[in-house]
Structure formats: C-alpha cells, structure tokens
Amino acid sequence: MQWDYFFDQVISHRDALLQGTAVTIGVSLSAIVAGTLLGIAIGVAVTYGIKPLRWPARVYIDIIRGTPVLVLVLATFYISSAVGLDLGAFQAGVLALTLFCASHVGEILRGALQALPRGQIEAGRAIGLTFAGIFRHILFPQALRYALPTWITAAVEMVKASTLLSVIGVAELLLTTQQIISNNFLNMQFYLLAGLIYFLIDFAIEQVGRYVGRRLDRPARRTT
Amino acid sequence: MTPIVEVRALHKRFGELEVLKGIDLVVNEGDVVSIIGSSGSGKTTLLRCLNLLEEFHQGEVRIGGESIGYRQRNGQRVRASEREIAGQRAMTGMVFQAFNLFPHMSALDNVTLGLTRVRGMSRRQAVELADHWLERVGMLERRDHRPAQLSGGQQQRVAIARAIAMNPRVMLFDEATSALDPERVGEVLETIRSLAQEGMTMVLVTHEMRFARDVSDKVVFMDGGRIAEQGPPATLFSTPESPRLQAFLKTSSL
C-alpha cells in the first residue's frame, strides 16, 4: 500500500472530506431532532389520543416503519417535485429521514409509555394535574429512561441511513468519498477512512446517550 | 355541622353492568367514614367517583358544596372541562392501595410536585410545607430517598404526606394497607389514626374491621352496589340489622 500517496490524497481532498462529514452530521442531526419532536407527538397521539388522532398516528407508524428508507428518500425527492413542492435534494433527503425517524421514535415512546403503570396517571390526576402536567412531570421523564437505549440505536440508524441521500445527489460523506475515489482509485483506503468517520460519529452519539442516561439515574433530582 | 361530601342518587355503570345503584351519602366536616363490604360491592368505585377517577352516569357528588364533574348545558348533562375537573380533584386527597409514588422523584419531590404545579407555590414554600408533612408522617429523614429505597409502609406514609400537603377538604383512602406486609400495616394505620384525631375529614375503604370500628364516626356497609346499612360503629358492629351484614361480619376477623 502506498501510504504516502494516500496521505497526500487525504490532504489535498481534506476540504471535500470535511464538507462531506459536515453534511452527514447536519443531515443526521436535523433528522434526529425534527424526527424526535414529531415522533413524540405521534407517540403521545397513538398512546393517549382520541380515536381520530390515534388511528392516523397508528397507520403512519406502521406504513413508514415498514417502508425501506431508500424508497422513502426517492419517493420524497420525486413526489415533492411532482406536486410542485420546490425542495432541493438536501431538503427532500432531510424530510425523508425525519419522517422515518419520527415513525421509530413514535413507536419507541408508545412502548415506553405503555410500560408505565396506570396508577401513575391516577396519582397525577389525584393531586390535580392536567394531562399536560402529568405527561411533562410524571410520564415523560419515566418513559425517557425506558426509551433512551432504543432511542440511541435509532439515532445511530439515522446516521447510517443518511448515506442513502447519495443516490439523490446530496454530497454527504459517502458520495464525497466515491467522488474522491473516482479520481485516485484508492478504493480500500478511502472507504476505510469513511467507515472510520462514520464510526466516530456514532460513537459520539452513544457517548452522549450514556451521559444522559447517567444524568437520569442520578438520585434525588430536583424537578422544580 | 357542615357537609363536606354529599352524594345524591349516584349511579355508575361499567358497560351493561350497574355497579352503583343509587348511593346517598353525607360526610360532615371532621367525620371519619369507613366503607366496608365484600369485593365487588362497589365501595372502591364509590370512592373513586368522589375524586372523578371514575365517571358516573346519574346523580350528583358535591365536595364542599360544589357539584363536581358535570354541569348542565342547555338542559344537557355534560362533563366539565379538563381544567375544571383537575381543580375539583385537588379538593380531595387520594391515597391508593398501590401507593403510586412517582419512582423517578425523591420523597420530597413527590410531595412538592402538586404544591408547585397545582397550588402555585414557590419552591421554598413548597419544600417548607412538604418537610412539615414528611415530619408529621415520620419520613423527614428519608426525604431525599427514592420510592424504591423505601419500604411499603414508608412509601405509603410519603403518599399520605403528598395527598394531605395539598390541603384537601377530605382525604380518601382506598384500601391503604391492603398491599402492605402485615408488620407494616400498623405504622400506616397509626398515621391515619393520628390525622383523624386532629379532625381531618376522611373516607376510608378498608378491610381492617378493627380499625374501622376504632377510628370511625360512621361505618357504611355496601352490598351489591347499594348502601345496605350505615351507622355509628358501635351499633353497626354489635347489632347488625341486615342478614348480609351479619354474614359479612361473621367471615371477617374483628
């Protein structure tokens, strides 16, 4: 292996590599944040919603979760332009990943909320809290603790799924890597480098998750 | 004597099954009323109607003179808004069989949650009041413990502090000692007894016949969704009139 040549190539493409990494992180984080917020709303609707809310939420979760992400990405990209929504590849890609993330977060949250004993809601009602207060102070913090490990897994999945945006031309890390390789043919080295960067991003997400988990486990937290 | 709880012609159904078939009950200020009866007689359901954890289909419940849960709109009986119901629930304090403490919070925070979020107290006021009631139930030293670090009896005492710190008009106890180990029952009953002696208005659903006899001003015997017999404990336990109560008392240890 010609290491000198490889390092030269890394240095001369460093801007592109950094740019691609930044796009990957940006796409993933946007989709995770937006998808989590939307997913919380869907999870609440499917668990506690009145029927007209519960059914659409259930159908949403089942359909989106059952669809391959690549299909979602392509569908969002082509359907949005067909119906006159002027989304660029980046926006369409983020939207697709957000919808996908939300379906998973919704299902994760539903599972965690349903695992909580019924008496928790009743105890909250008995002290005069409205549902919003019960959810915020009693249900959500407990569900978060249950759901956190699965949520971290879902977040890592989102980073992996962001590679699929390369097919609609978003220059994230994978597409950038492929473009570099087409110039210098260092297939193995640059794919390994991309793999390492993906690993580091996922590793960072897991560390954040562990940190949050430890915070949640800390005894005698002040809640007010 | 001011009536705190007034129940009139209360009916409640679970689907086709009518579990409360017209209940009339008055609890005066400072009274301790025990509801006894076999499982399925409707006693827990009645208690849960008093703080609207159960809906009811006919009749009326008044707490402190205010009719709760439902209002008349254009001659129709409609359920009150969520916010109104939440406020009405805060007029009563409920102690559950399974304690239902919030496991992610310390004992102290279990008590302060309602004080800050419902009563609108500052954190400092709430802590001061919570400490007062935790001391009162003998749990001040454990205020920073989570429920999982407490015994059943200790958890139930924290739950009592959580309910009573809200300054309710009436305390409702739903089989508060049924889930406890036998050696833990005494400490919780003692706590309830001392609150009763201070003049707290209480309604207890209980299987502890001896306790009901000792602590109550009135005992209510429910059978098949109706109040079959009620009166002062001395008369009710020594000279039960209905054959159903006679049979019930024979099978329960006094």
Image (cartoon, helix red, strand yellow):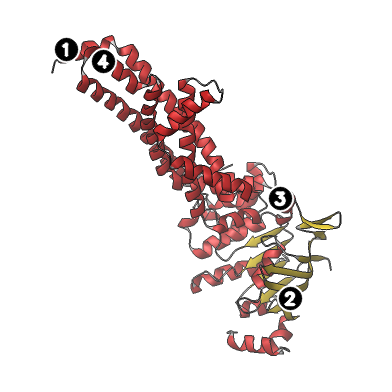
Nearer to me, A45 or B148: A45
Residues at discs 4 and 1 in contact (Cβ within 8 Å): no
For disc 1, the marked residue is A4
In the displayed structure, A68 sits above or below A114; it is above
Q: CA distance from mark 2 to mark 1?
A: 94 Å
Query: Are the residues under badges 3 and 2 in a single subunit?
Result: yes
Residues at discs 3 and 2 in contact (Cβ within 8 Å): no
Q: CA distance from mark 4 to mark 1?
A: 19 Å
Q: Residues within 10 Å of mark 3 (few under 14, many from 20)?
A: few
Marking on residue B82: 3
- Residue type at mark 3 is Glu
Residues at discs 4 and 3 in contact (Cβ within 8 Å): no
Q: Residue furthest left?
A: A1
Query: Are the residues under badges 1 and 3 in a single subunit?
Result: no
Q: Residue furthest front?
A: A82
Across and down, in percent, residue B101 comes to 55, 56
For disc 4, the marked residue is A182
Residue depicted at x 76% and y 69%: B10
Q: CA distance from mark 3 to mark 2?
A: 34 Å
Q: Quadrant of the C terminus of chain A?
A: top right
Nearer to me, A6 or A52: A52
Nearer to me, B133 or A3: A3
Asked whether, in this view, residue B232 is left or right of residue A137, the answer is right
- Residue type at mark 4 is Ser
Specify whether residue A188 is in view.
yes
Q: Nearer the viewer, mark 4 or mark 1?
A: 4
Across and down, in percent, residue B29 comes to 78, 66
Chain of the residue under label 3: B
Marking on residue B70: none
